[in-house]
Amino acid sequence: MVKAYSAFGAALLLALTATAAEAQNIQPQTQEVQQQKANDLERVDNPLTNTLRSLRDEYGLSLRGALINETAGNTSGGERRATTNVGQGQVGADLDLQTVFGIPNASLHATEYHDYGSSLSLKGIGNGVRVQEIYKNPYNIFHFGLLTYEQKLFDNKVDIDVGRTAASKYFAHLDLACRFMSGTNCGIPALANSEAGFSLLPSATWGGKISYQATPEFYVMTGAFEVNAAVQPTSGFDWRTDKATGITVPFEVSYGTGLKTERYPFDIKGGAYYSNGGHTNPNLNTAGRSLGTNLGTAQNIPDRSGIYLLGDKTIYRRDDRSLRNITLIGGYVQPFDHTEVYSTQVFGGAVWTGPFAARSRDSIGFVTNYFRVSDLENSFLTDARVKAGNFGTNNPNMFTFELDYNIAVMPGFSITPDIQYIVHPDNSALPRVNAPVPGNAFVLALRAEVTFGDLPFAAPGRAGDP
């Protein structure tokens, strides 16, 4: 815990020091000056950049990668005090097939992942919604998690992407929501992740999507993805389908504008999903008795479905050319069946990009979430607690609050001090401990991210697949 406090304090000190120094010595830059600096980076000459530029221009090969590390500790609340560190490394490549083989508007994408560490939610708080979003695979292994062929048609209005991939790569994304460290909203809302049968990288399965960009503002998209939990503990090269349990079919429509075309842009996405991959009853075993009291094998529920609605709206921008802005975000996820761990998620927040003239690429973010723990899950948690020798019933209304400051230290490197507060955390991740109902949890966290594409002119921001 001392390490968590020290890292958190150091990050805050760095942010304040950098802001104060630049405020004294640097005047606000115009859009033209910022663009000129970007052009200067493109012209940088050294052996590394020349090699990468040659690979891209002559051979159609672009390299990318990231290292993301998240440290978090709960100073109070949860099931017990703990501090954990978790992270993921990514190395990937994109191959332009038009450059190599003359196939117009076609490309290949591949990514290798390495996960390490363990989640604070599993070690301390106990809640089913992760405090660290990067914790995506409980197995600390190297995992070949993405290999897709992408083909664009009809002036790039139709985009097809198929191969070893994941539903969460394409659907239910709200870009600004994915700048937060917790797993409540990044990379997709928690319920779309855990309650919808969506596959999640790095545990790729067979699947694909097709989208149609009807206008610059409007698109429709659908796809189909194999449900196969057996891929999680593998290296990613087991491509058999004999352990698949079904498919997930999502559908999404979106209408939105951008900073380049509108002073106060917005984006709204609505989606629905159906999955016949099956999931387990949170409370009953195959004999129809309480899992918490009698143990046994959970009942299998054959299918699941639901809807989601996501949106953002810029409400402040200094002028038509400025990147500094304040944008509101919000969302709603509703499973249709009643045999899930959570039955509803609603969230809202705001992101202030460029809070200071001298720190135009920094951002301050706040987001709050409401989760309704299902009646079945609450019954299971109560019975499991009694079975373990304790007592108490969880409040089914869980609220999370998160505040952070993203410091763009330099292109391709950022650090983010993060504060989270969880009201009425469930203990779905630690259901059988001999402990009372977990108390409200206060979490201090620090995220560090290094991204690289065509070094050294990678823009600061989140890493990810294409």
Image (spheres, grey):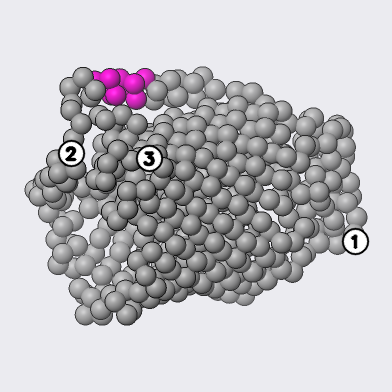
Residue 422 at least partly seen: yes
Residue 316 numbered mark, or none: 3
For the N terminus, the quadrant is top right
Residue plotted at (66% across, 56% down):
334
* Distance in Å between CA atoms under marks 3 and 1: 57 Å
Kind of residue sitting beneath label 2: Thr
Q: Which mark is residue 357?
A: none
Q: Is residue 204 above or below residue 5?
A: below
Is 352 positioned to the left or the right of 370 in the image? left
Q: Residues within 10 Å of mark 3 (few under 14, many from 20)?
A: some
Report the quarter where the C terminus lies.
bottom left
The quadrant in which residue 244 appears is bottom right
Q: In the picture provided, is 46 more to the left or to the right than 168?
A: left
**Location of residue 430 (image quadrant):** top right
Q: Residue at x 54, y 73 (%)?
A: 224
Which mark is nearer the camera, 2 or 3?
A: 3
Residue under numbered circle 2: 30
Residue 368 locus on image (x, y percent) = 57, 38
Asked whether the residues under the numbered discs 3 and 1 touch, taking CB atoms below 8 Å apart as contact, a structural biologist would say: no
Question: What is the three-letter code of the residue carrying label 3?
Answer: Tyr
Q: Which residues are magenta?
A: 13-21
